[in-house]
Amino acid sequence: MRAQQVPRFDVFGGYSDRLFDAPSIGYPNYSNLYGGGLAGTWHITMKIGVTVDTSANWGSGLSIWNYMAGPQYVLRREKADIYFQFLFGKTQNTANIQQLTRSGFESVGRSLGGGAGYDYHWKPRISIRVLEADYFHTDTFKTHQNDLRLSTGLVFHFGHKGHRRKL
Amino acid sequence: MPDKEKSLALSLLLLVGSIGCVSSHTAYVTLPTVNGISAYRIDNSSGRLTEIVGSPYATGNSPGPVVVAPSKKFVFVANRDDNNISRFKIDSTSGGLSEILPRTSTDFNPVAIAINASGSFLFVANELASNLSVYAVDPSTGDLRAVSAPFPTPQSPVALAVTPSGKFLYVVNSNLGAVLAYSVSASGMLETIPGSPFIAGTGALAVAVDPREHFVYVANATANSVSIFAINSISGTLMEVPGSPFLTGTAPVSLTVTISGQFLYVANASSSNISGYTIDPRTGFATAITEGPFAAGTTPVLVVTDPHGTYIYSISQTTRIITEFTLQTTGNSALGVLTNNEQTATTPEPAVSMSVTP
């Protein structure tokens, strides 16, 4: 695929860092949870797509699994794409505080969020996701959390949707 | 990547590393009707109470008195119906609790518990057995080992307090309306102090020791008064201070002295308020704070000083509310005044005891 082509599908894989709103569940400070994510985007038009996003982050006796989907809007440039997305789905939060009959506490709840990202076109079929930043509002453990997730990694392009405009 | 975008990415990463660093400590509250212990995080600056995830944690049957070890590693809870002590490890990150088995046996009906300032000995009053258990605490595991067979007391010991030096133990006996005084040896053995028991008032129910080890305070629930005794620093004998007993509200059932030793607060269960007193550091004379008594919800059964010095808590069993007061210690306002700072927390079931991490 030549660099100026627009793919039909993208698959992202990479590292993510989630700033978890741990004070909402009694922890002293926000917790940095490290992990990774996978996402797939189907570009319905040149600018509009649908993305499915999963990520897992853990650390400090906490872990978070995220399963979300939503629309994505892409601003296409010759060397890069800038995109904006809205996501909704479920979050599963786990706090590993050992009990006599269980290994910890788990809660699954609604998750809403959104963010933006910047993909730099590295090779015809591969882009570098320089940074994606997302905000999430989740409802778990009978309270609310406001989290920030940063992601970086590689985006693999499949198919051919059309040609991007030359600027 | 252009420089502008590099700096944006760097800024976001720095933001991730810097958000939300606040100082806080934790508190633990026992809930006998659900056989559990709730944990709360207290924001040092705002006083906000946040329940810690997983709370309440399971205890034995009818958990009553609770105490946090000075090391902040362990919490000990006496299970009154099981006649034993649950030992919990405090999760260093979350402040949540994980019980460590086995539980340690006590005698019948452990109703009061105290730990010395070094965390080396745990003292338990067994009301129905009419004796005191003393345990050596392993500093690394929190394991409890009885130092000897329980020490017999007159009938119905209901409350106890150990002095900051760990040299003396004072036990309230409600039947006698008196304070039993013991010296504590280096090995944890108790020896009755000559002159003990020291008469307080009818219905003596609660005891507290001045952090400077000058005075002992006893709440007399039936007499509606508080008795104040001066401690002989050498022998541990008590002498009631001039003016004692001092009048309180109706049914004083709990009391606490601030970490400065300057103020004394008494929870009056029937009059639903807290009496406050300024303590003369030389004589022990208690002068009622004129702005008091302070409203404390319905039937306050417990009043506790936060070791961090800023807050006083009261617990209402009927409304299941922990009320937090800010203690006025500086400035132009009247000292010792308690201001309800609206940072209340609701316990899932009625609470009976509370301990705050040092």
Image (cartoon, coloured by chain):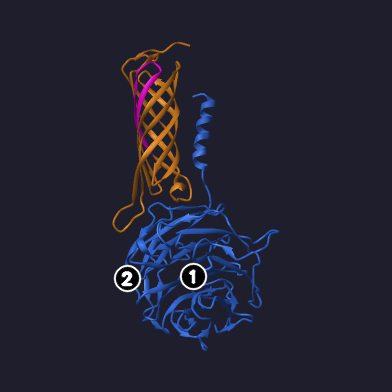
Amino acid on which the number 1 mark rests in the picture: Ser
Question: Residue A85 has which mark?
Answer: none
Q: Nearer the viewer, residue A52 or B185?
A: A52
- The picture places residue B272, in percent across and down from the top left corner, at 53, 65
Q: CA distance from mark 2 to mark 1?
A: 28 Å
> Is-magenta flag for residue A149?
no
Query: Does residue A34 appear in the picture of this structure?
Result: yes
- Quadrant for residue A107, please give it: top left
Which colour represents chain B? blue
> Is-magenta flag for residue A49?
yes
Q: Nearer the viewer, residue B75 or B171?
A: B171
| Residue at which label 2 appears | B82
Amino acid on which the number 2 mark rests in the picture: Asp
Range of the magenta residues?
Answer: A35-53
Mark 2 or mark 1, earlier in chain: 2
Answer few, some or many: residues within 10 Å of disc 1's Cα (few below 14, many 20 plus, some between 14 and 19): some
Chain letter belonging to callout 2: B
Who's orange, chain-wise? A
Residue at 57 percent across and 52 percent down: it is B45
Q: Secondary structure at mark 1?
A: loop
State whether discs 2 and 1 lie on one chain.
yes
| Residue at which label 1 appears | B118
